[in-house]
Image (cartoon, grey):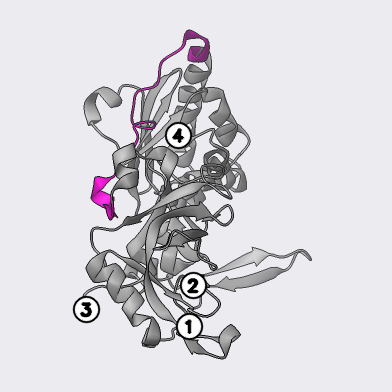
Amino acid sequence: MTRDRMIIPPEMLPRSEREDVIGPTGSPIIVRNEAMFTAMKHSAGELSPFFVALRDECRITGHFCPSCKQTICPPFQTRCPECNFVEMERVSIGDRGVMAAAPVIVFFAPSRFKNEAPFANGYVFLRDERGRECDTALPVRVRTTTGMMRPGIVNKNTPVKVVFKNTREGSLQDIFVVAESELRAPDIQRTPLMESDLIAAKTVRAPLLVRPRFRADFARFVGLLSDLSGRVARSGRAQADLAGWRRSIRFQTGGGTVDVRIDDKVLSVDADMPARTGEPDVLLAIDDPKSVLAWITDGAALTNLLMDGSVRMDAGDLETITRLDRLPRSLRRDRI
């Protein structure tokens, strides 16, 4: 039992803020932060054995109807309504299956889950101990070993494997699935497969091959970043976007590598940083540096580039990306 962790982390609580925004009629509209708080406890009830098995045994269970032969997972009912409520039997469920549909990827989460974004939610059809596909799909988180989750990595009917977290608390968050195509053959056969057993692919952290044809666009990108740094220093709105935030970001491109550092309200750029600073907090891999030029020149969203795969990120630090996305818009509003 953990008592020192808050349901809503303190850093996710909204600040007391009010501002005037000009509405469509040209008149000011007052915008203010508000909060609604509801505290409650609830019991897992008849589902408790399912969650206890996840937590204590690293095992998935379901219910089987001896009359109509259907198997349900999760075991959301103990008696079958199709068979005059005959009592269902508890059975073990396997840890391999197929996706019922492409998972929904959440990039912009509500405050409670903001520090988890991006994350993907989906449904998987597993098989029971008889080898028969379950009649209901299990809701699960979907992850990838290749960096940040994005569309196209997992789709409908993609074979997936259930992975158990090393630390479990008795909830559906104790497990997640990854595509079997990302796993080694021994890992696919291992039961249970633990989070610590996964080997993350090196597709993001591995150095990109520097190609001469990208050098000119990379030089322009570095120049635009330096110009962005100077403009941020003259913009109150842009500085507010970075206030209280500290991160080192590395842009690793096919034309070269440059580091950017956010230090409270300051944005600094140094093309020689990678040789001095070690591993960054956030690494963005970009094959063609031209693909990110529009972020600075036209305010194109880095978030969209992450979603379409033009930019790859090795960690889910979307808050940093969101702050970077705000800068060009803030500079335009300040006419800088």
**Residue at which label 1 appears:** 77
Who is closer to the viewer here, 20 or 10?
10
Precedes in sequence: disc 1 or disc 4? 1
Rounded to the nearest angstrom, the CA distance separating label 1 from label 4 is 62 Å
Residue 72 numbered tag: 2
Residue 43 numbered tag: none
Precedes in sequence: disc 2 or disc 3? 3
Rounded to the nearest angstrom, the CA distance separating label 1 from label 2 is 8 Å
**Residue shown at 33%/74% (left/top)?**
51
Say what secondary structure mark 1 lies in: loop
Where 86 sits versus 182, above or below? below
Of helix, strand and loop, which mostly describes the magenta segment?
A: loop
Who is closer to the viewer here, 45 or 303?
45
Who is closer to the viewer here, 277 or 31?
277
Residue 133 in the magenta stretch? The answer is: no
Quadrant containing the C terminus is top right
Residue 3 numbered tag: 3
Rounded to the nearest angstrom, the CA distance separating label 4 from label 3 is 46 Å
Closer to the eye: label 2 or 4? 2
Amino acid marked by disc 2:
Ile
Precedes in sequence: disc 4 or disc 3? 3
**Residue at which label 4 appears:** 230
Q: Which residues are magenta?
A: 191-215
Task: Say if residue 233 shows up in the picture.
Answer: no
Point out residue 19 in the picture as x, y percentages from the top left corner. 56, 68
